[in-house]
Amino acid sequence: MSTVYFYDLPVYRLSYDQYNALMDQRLAAQVERQKSIPGYDPTKEAVDGMSQRQYEAFGPWRFNETIGYIRLYFLSSQVRGEYFSAEKKRNMLGRTKVFVYRTWKLAAEVDIRRGQQVTNERVWNAIQEYVARCRKELKKGRVIDDSLLQMVGPHTDWLALLGWSTSR
């Protein structure tokens, strides 16, 4: 059986909107602490500086809140996904992560049904079904970002990637 790895899906501890709300709360709390100093009212430039230091400390969501990856692959006529994560008992804001192999199959595989007429659309639908199954398997609150996969998936020649002729 041939294994074809084709995409690594990032998994986040919280959504982009939740992350930004948390950053806004942190900044607001810091500004309030500054305002509590008698006779001091932080200027817009001071608040912008606090925001910049916070960004430098925690970084952008897309690259610093990742807690795992689902490595999507085809195994014969099935779509599967290995799971690697850096999850601990408590995942805090920060940049110290070590990703560890967790399982060879995060969710039940999806069969592309080689016996039927296989098209790129059928393969793409199977991939989307597998990602949906993965969403159900992850801990509550975890977010799979498949936005880039959604952009390229419908336009990919999946049959060529698999080495299958269009007559299958």
Image (tube, rainbow, N blue to C red):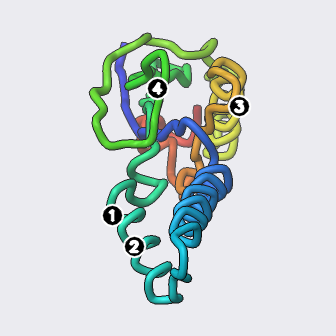
Q: Circle 2 sits on which residue?
A: 52
Q: Residue at x 70, y 24 (%)?
A: 140
Q: Given this view, does label 4 or label 1 mark the residue nearer the observer?
A: 1
Q: Residue at x 56, y 56 (%)?
A: 26
Amino acid type indicated by mark 3:
Ala
Res. 49 in view: yes
Q: What is the spatial separation of the Cα atoms under label 3 and label 2, in whole angstroms?
A: 36 Å
Closer to the chain start, of discs 3 and 2, is: 2
Answer left or right for 138 relative to 42: right
Q: Which mark is residue 56?
A: 1
Are the residues tagged 2 and 1 within 8 Å (C-beta)?
yes
Q: Circle 3 sits on which residue?
A: 132
Q: Badge 1: few (under 14), some or many (20 or more) residues near its Cα, within 10 Å?
A: few
Q: Residue at x 46, y 54 (%)?
A: 62
Q: Against 73, is 100 above or below?
A: above
Q: What is the spatial separation of the Cα atoms under label 1 and label 3, in whole angstroms?
A: 34 Å
Amino acid type indicated by mark 1:
Glu
Are the residues tagged 4 and 1 within 8 Å (C-beta)?
no
Amino acid type indicated by mark 4:
Phe
Q: Pick the quarter of the image with the C terminus.
A: top right
